[in-house]
Image (cartoon, rainbow, N blue to C red):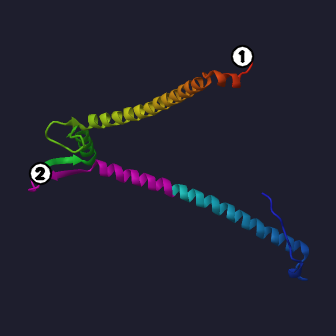
Amino acid sequence: MKFTVEVEIDWIDEETGLNEAVSGEIKSRLADKVYKHVEKQLADKISKDISSSLDAQIQKTYEEFMEKSFTIYDQWGDPKKENVSVKSLLKEKLDNFLTERVDDNGKPTGYGGKVRYEQILDKQSQKQINDFLSQLSAKVIAGIKNDINEQAVERITKGILSDYSLKKLVNPLNG
């Protein structure tokens, strides 16, 4: 730790000497540095303790909620399912959601349709195939255009140069 001591000569009076003034200033600054350092360490430790305590309490509350049992009632108030936990209910709902039959728009249907996870997989695979084909098509079209342009330039050049007099102008030694 490094610190600089500055002493104002104006406030040194006749009763206290230079040694006492410097010693007092050193003690004061050292106490301030130690206090700030200890305060920062305490704040960090308290913050970590509070954070871990809150995390533990949140986890405990979450687990209690997920394991809490309750009864599901139908629209007339009769018990439909008793002693059902939130966790088991979520599992059941997710299983039912993924295996539910849906139409082409993903809406539940009682007639025909596909299982939801099949419909999701089909849509994603179709999307990727379409993207791949559109990119491939763009590359093929660009390649064909480039080849057609090169062939057209070559034919036009040959047609113009096929004229005998033009050949002589371009290359008089061979003519």
Residue 72 versus residue 57: which sits nearer the camera?
A: 72
Between discs 2 and 1, the one toward the N terminus? 2
The vertical placement of 131 against 76, above or below, is above
Residue 60, image x and y in percent? 37, 51
- Mark 2 lies on a secondary structure that is strand
Which corner quadrant holds the N terminus? bottom right
Q: Is residue 27 left or right of residue 73?
A: right
Give the spatial CA distance, label 2 vs label 1. Answer: 106 Å
The quarter of the picture where residue 102 lies is top left
Q: What residue type is labelled 2?
A: Pro
Mark whose residue sits in front, 2 or 1: 1
The quarter of the picture where residue 115 lies is top left
Residue 144, image x and y in percent? 48, 28
Question: Extreme front residue here?
Answer: 165
Residue at figure coordinates x 11%, y 55% from the top left:
75
Q: Is residue 107 left or right of residue 157?
A: left
- From which residue to which does the magenta span run? 50-79
Residue at figure coordinates x 76%, y 65% from the top left:
30
Residue 17, image x and y in percent? 90, 77
Residue marked by disc 1:
174
Question: Extreme bottom residue here?
Answer: 14
Q: Which mark is residue 148?
A: none
- Would you say the magenta stretch is mainly helix, strand or loop? helix
Residue marked by disc 2:
79
Q: Which amino acid does label 1 sit on?
A: Asn
